[in-house]
């Protein structure tokens, strides 16, 4: 597994449960098409799994 992963927000958190917007904010994703590189930890993977329908994940190189 890679040391870091690149997460990009593809769908907006508007008109969704507040839970999803809080998870996105915790990942550092605040605007559409914003990309962040995060450490590949089980906690981050769990957050990504909750919003997997809204984000795109790749290896950060």
Image: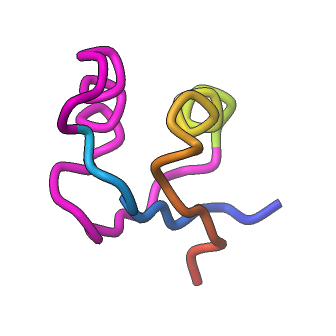
Farthest residue toward the bottom?
61
Q: Is residue 24 above or below residue 10?
A: above
Indicate yes or no whether the magenta region holds residue 27. Answer: yes
Image quadrant where residue 25 sits: top left
**x and y percent of residue 28 in the render?**
26, 46
| Colour convention | rainbow
Image quadrant where residue 61 sits: bottom right
Front residue of 17/40: it is: 17
Horizontal side of 29 relative to 8 (left or right) equals left
**x and y percent of residue 2 in the render?**
74, 65
Front residue of 27/2: it is: 27
Which residue does the image show at 56% across and 45% down from the upper left? 53
Q: Is residue 1 above or below residue 42?
A: below
Q: Which contiguous range is marked in magenta?
A: 14-40
Q: Quadrant of the N terminus?
A: bottom right
Horizontal side of 36 relative to 29 (left or right) equals right
Indicate yes or no whether the magenta region holds residue 58. Answer: no
């Amino acid at each position: 597994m890679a040391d870091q992963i690149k997460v990009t927000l593809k769908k907006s958190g508007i008109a969704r449960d507040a839970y999803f917007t809080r998870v996105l904010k915790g990942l550092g994703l605040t605007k559409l098409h914003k990309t962040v590189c995060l450490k590949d930890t089980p906690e981050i993977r769990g957050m990504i799994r909750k919003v997997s329908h809204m984000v795109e994940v790749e290896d950060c190189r």
